[in-house]
Structure formats: structure tokens, C-alpha cells
Image (cartoon, rainbow, N blue to C red):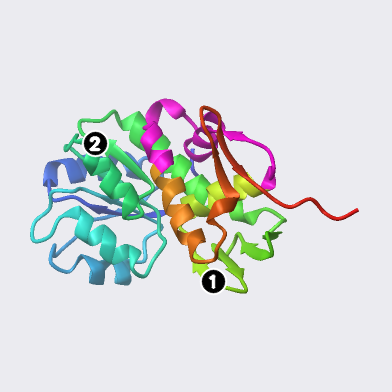
Amino acid sequence: MVTALFKIMLIEDDITLFHEVKERLSQWSYDVHGVQDFSKVTEEFTELRPDLVIIDIQLPKFDGFHWCRMIRSHSNVPIIFLSSRDHPTDMVMSMQLGADDFIQKPFHFEVLIAKIQATLRRVYNYNTERVELRTWRGATVEYVKNTITSSAGSVELTKNEMFILKLLIERKNQIVSREDLIKSLWDNEHFVSDNTLTVNVNRLRKKLENLGLDPYIETKVGQGYMATEEAAPL
């Protein structure tokens, strides 16, 4: 069980579902808050400063994609979509906007808890490791700040993007299988669409393109991905 009290913002207009989820999460020591005005979600998010956001797609005023985009414009807080919409494009869209996971309604509460716990561990625990930065291809990768900086500039990564990059450069010049990446990111591959990983890797590459580093994340067809590094001179 999670012992720390994490603050969760649940953006859900179904009052019955909201109270059910809030009650269940409270039993796991999560501090759950709803939305008072669905036209001012960003303002309420800024005031609350939650550790994690759970958001529906179909909402009053604006949909969840709009609010995800607004939150992502100034925060890397982890975001999980919780929606009854089941079209593959909805999941793809959520990941492209920077969401960390997607859960389809109706759902088993155990799945929701597992995904929340995995996301919080990934986001708030991995960067307490002793090693906080690495150099790769002449760039400085700062795990804590979620940034990568080179002579071409600096880009900020989401938690998932940084976690993927970290796994790859810690095993540079070695193929990391898709299965290993999925298990490391989400703990249980049975809860994750394979396409979710693809979307996150593509977003990472797009950001690395600004630094001229995208060619060094190679796809090994049928195997996985590899971050390449030049061998040190003898």
C-alpha cells in the first residue's frame, strides 16, 4: 500500500462515479479532489497543484483533450485518462498530448489502483536514485529536471519520455526489447497497448530532433530500440 499521501485531481462530471472513485481511493490514502467549475479547470489545477490528474474525455464546456493540452502547456504532472470511449484514436490522441496512461470504462478498480501506483512510482521515485545525470552523444541528460541539453539547445521531456531515454542510455549500444520497456514503464504489460509505447518513443524522437539526436535512437525491427554511443578512443 502507498504510505505517502498523494493529491489526486479527478476531472469527472459523473457525480456517482466521482464519489465512488474518491471513496475507494481514500481507502488507499489518496487525497482526491474534484472540479467545481468545468470552465475553469486550469485555474483549479494551478490552485490545487495535484501530484496526479485523472481525467475523462467527455466533459462539459471543453473535452478532456483540451484540458490535457492546457495542463501540459505548463506542467509535467502525470495524467491518466479514464473514458468510456474505446476508439483507438482516442488513446493515440491522449498519448500524443502527453498523457501517461489510458483506462477504458467500465474498469476494474484493481486495474485503476495498479496503474496509479505504477505511475506514481515511476514519476516520483525513480529520480531519487544516486545518479541524477548522464552524458550521451555530447548532451547532458538531467533525470531530476527531465531535460536534455546540448550545444544545439535544451528540451524538456515528460516523465515517460525521460524514463524511456534513461532506460535506453543506461544500456547504450544494446537492444532493449519492447517488452522490457513496457514492463519497466507500466509494471504489467497486460494493462498496456503496444501502441502506447510507440507513441511515447515517437514523441521522444520528435523532441530529440531539435537537438539533432533523433538518429541515435534506433528501431530494431521485431526486437526493440537502442540508444547508440560512439566507442571511447583507445
Residue occupied by mark 2: 88
Q: Residue at x 49, y 43 (%)?
A: 2
Q: Quadrant of residue 70?
A: bottom left
Q: Nearer the viewer, residue 96 or 191?
A: 96
**Magenta stretch: includes residue 176:** yes
> Alpha-carbon distance for marks 2 and 1?
32 Å
Please determine whether, in this image, residue 190 is positioned above or below residue 234: above
Please report whichever mark, 2 or 1, sits nearer to the chain's N-terminal start: 2
Q: Quadrant of residue 68?
A: bottom left
**Mark 1 closeness class: few <14, some 14–19, many ≥20 residues within 10 Å:** some
Q: Position of residue 205 (x, y in %)?
A: 48, 53
Residue occupied by mark 1: 154
**Mark 2 closeness class: few <14, some 14–19, many ≥20 residues within 10 Å:** few
- Secondary structure mostly seen in the magenta stretch: helix
Residue type (three-letter) at the residue carrying disc 2: Pro
Furthest-left residue in this view: 61
Q: Residue at x 31, y 55 (%)?
A: 97
Q: Residue at x 47, y 40 (%)?
A: 118
Q: Nearer the viewer, residue 33 or 222?
A: 222
- Determine the secondary structure under disc 2: helix
| Left or right: 11 in relation to 75 | left
Q: Position of residue 168 (x, y in %)?
A: 61, 45
| Left or right: 178 in relation to 11 | right
Note whether residue 125 is visible.
no
Please determine whether, in this image, residue 17 is positioned above or below residue 131: above
Q: Position of residue 4 (x, y in %)?
A: 50, 51
